[in-house]
Amino acid sequence: MDLALSPEQHAFREEVRAFLAASLSPELRRGAALTSGVFAEPDIAREWQAILEARGWLVYHWPGHAGGPGWTPIQRWIFEKECAEAGAPVLPGMGLKLVGPVLYTYGTPAQKDHYLPRLRTAEHVWAQGFSEPGSGSDLASLRTRAVRDGDHYVVSGHKIWTTQAQYANRLFALVRTDADVKPQQGISFLLIDMALPGVTVKPILSASGDHELNEVFLDEVRVPVSDRVGDEGQGWSIAKFLLENERGGSSFAPAILADLARLRTSTGPLTGELADRALRLQLEAEALEMTELRTLIEIEHGAAPDPRSLTTKLLASEIRQGVEALAVDAFGLAGLQLPVERPFYGDDMPSPVGSAQAQVAAARYLNARAWSIFGGTSEIQLTLIAKAALGL
Amino acid sequence: MNLALSDEQAMVRDMVRRFLADRYDATTMAKGPMSPDDWRALGELGLFALLTPEQAGGLGGGAVEVMIVSEELGRALAITPMAEAILLCGRVIAGNPAAERWSDRLMQGDALLAFASGGAFVDERLCGSAGIVRDGMDAEAFVVETEAGTLLLVDGQDSGVRRTPVRLVDGSMAANVRFDAAQAQPLTVPASLWAEAHALTGLSIVAELVGAMATLLDLTVDYVRQRHQFGKPIASFQVVQHRCARMYTWLEQSRSLLLKAALVEEEKRVQAVTAARAYIGDVALKLAEEAVQLHGGMGVTDELAVGRVLRRVLLLSRLHGGGIAARAALAA
């Protein structure tokens, strides 16, 4: 038993550090620090994506056969931890982390050849069309219809909570291709060009005033059958693969620990109840880091993921929300600003008060409420844990 | 990075687990201290020698061995003097000529030493009293840390030592000890050894707590499966499932901090053990309270294991100031 990095892992970490020191400009760091949503906004994200792609590290979590660098789970963790500590922008995951792995796992050779390179160059920007107004936690009840008409599906329906759809030109969506079988069996997975006639995006403003979310209306959109991934009716198992990938793919704790450290630098010494809350969050986050690492180390040594990996999304949501609440309380009135203009990191910002952390504290607090809702609510997570880990 | 036990470590774990499984189950666990015969038998198996430093003739087992053994003791809810007699006193007297006549017998399980805090050392004599000295009634000798911080060794037979019994919440016995000009020998203990002894004692306690938490969760999951209300097992109710799932997250987070405390580099050990105590001291008791709640009325009786385990967890989680003291130390 040991937690030490091997000499090779050490050298790798130094390589990542050197790269980040050289590539992460002050503007990118500032943009990342002033991001109030889950993902960096496009002008920052695009620049950082291009830098990573040029270095060959954009799709660091993809296997070698899919064009990734072929890193081990521990290498990926080292990379994520270093990026978090350096304050790198968080790239939108819809393409890189969600549909990318689906494509290299289930896609036809033609689909891989067409979509994977364009995903990497950001020629294609992806949005996720899963949830519907009547289908949240009960996703399998989704009603968006895809009716076969020759070489096309005619797709009609209403998707919601579509993150960054206003910047996207491609949508991957779960659609119902068969209404006469069990709900899970009638679902297929389609790739939809958002420039097609019949696609309409309508913004949903968050309580923070941020525009991260959208509704996507599909009105008799004609999607080529060749843009279906997997077989007809295979959509539900592909979606499960995607959600497991979303859950288990990367670590939450490094970003939380890095944000907490930056917050504490920015607030200066805390006392009393604030100090106690900060300490408890620190302990929870350190425990989570080790909980994530335990699973990664086991996978690195050839084991299957332990059910404990199901706990991390739930725990990360709660700790993240705790950190954002701490920020609001620690900054006092300065933590109650909402930005007047978007994007927030432009040079001509109207006079903000306090540090970058203080300026985004309120918006981040509000946006972080979504952590325990998206990607499977905390209640769904608890049910999954009870089932998989305890057999209840 | 590797979390697999070595063959030797796995052997130790299996040996302790088998030994305890032959003696403890849900009907007998946490009923009272381990019998002196069983304690001696563990000594004969070489367990204490494994955890004793080499300069005292032991095998010099380190943090990982302490974690493995203590987690098994905790899992079986065996109530033993491991933390203070073997890990604290055993280390403090290691290689100390004044303690020679006890060190071998301690390692074999034939003699106990107890750790006491209090008193003043004046003219080669110890005066004063030490409140709750765990295993103080059975101890043949005391390692005493005086109010001034001097470490002393006191023979329990000394005419200046008087003890009165105190029963603790987990059924173990402690002593209220008075020292009336008792003969005492100063112990020279290198600061590094003293720090290591404290860290390993703390590590042992959190490992026992993690073992006990795992048992509590097992007991609770079994119980909610077999307990029927409203015509079905209460495990079928989502609120019960979610509370059990929450207990599981506490257990896994605790185990993570325990592993980290056992595996960090030596110079970060004290900090990591304190962090583990700061977290586990709180959630272990919270988990035990949940276990009692999910057992319903039976949970508050002395009849089911869960009520007795609550007592043991209450004691372990509050030793040395518990989570509150550990968080204060981290904040300082």
Image (cartoon, coloured by chain):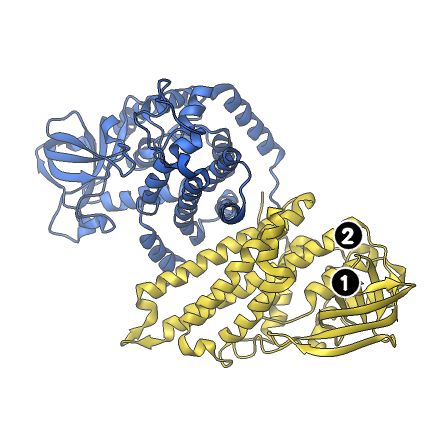
Chain colours: A blue, B yellow
Q: Where residue B15 sits in the image (x, y, percent)?
A: 64, 66
Tell whether B229 sits left or right of B71.
left
Chain for disc number 2: B
Which residue does the numbered mark 1 point to in the structure image?
B89
| Picture residue at 77% right of the left edge, 58% below the top | B91
Q: Where residue A108 sits in the image (x, y, percent)?
A: 26, 32
Residue B324 shows up from this direction: yes
Chain for disc number 1: B
Q: Residue A385 carries which label?
A: none
Which residue does the numbered mark 2 point to in the structure image?
B193
Residues under numbered marks 1 and 2 in contact, where contact means CB atoms less than 8 Å apart: no
Q: Where residue A296 sits in the image (x, y, percent)?
A: 49, 44
- Between B135 and B132, the one lying in front of the other is B132
- Between B238 and A225, the one lying in front of the other is B238
CA neighbours of label 2 inside 10 A, class few (<14), some (14 to 19), many (20+) = some
Tell whether B10 sits left or right of A89.
right
Give the residue furthest to the bottom. B303
Give the residue furthest to the front. A333
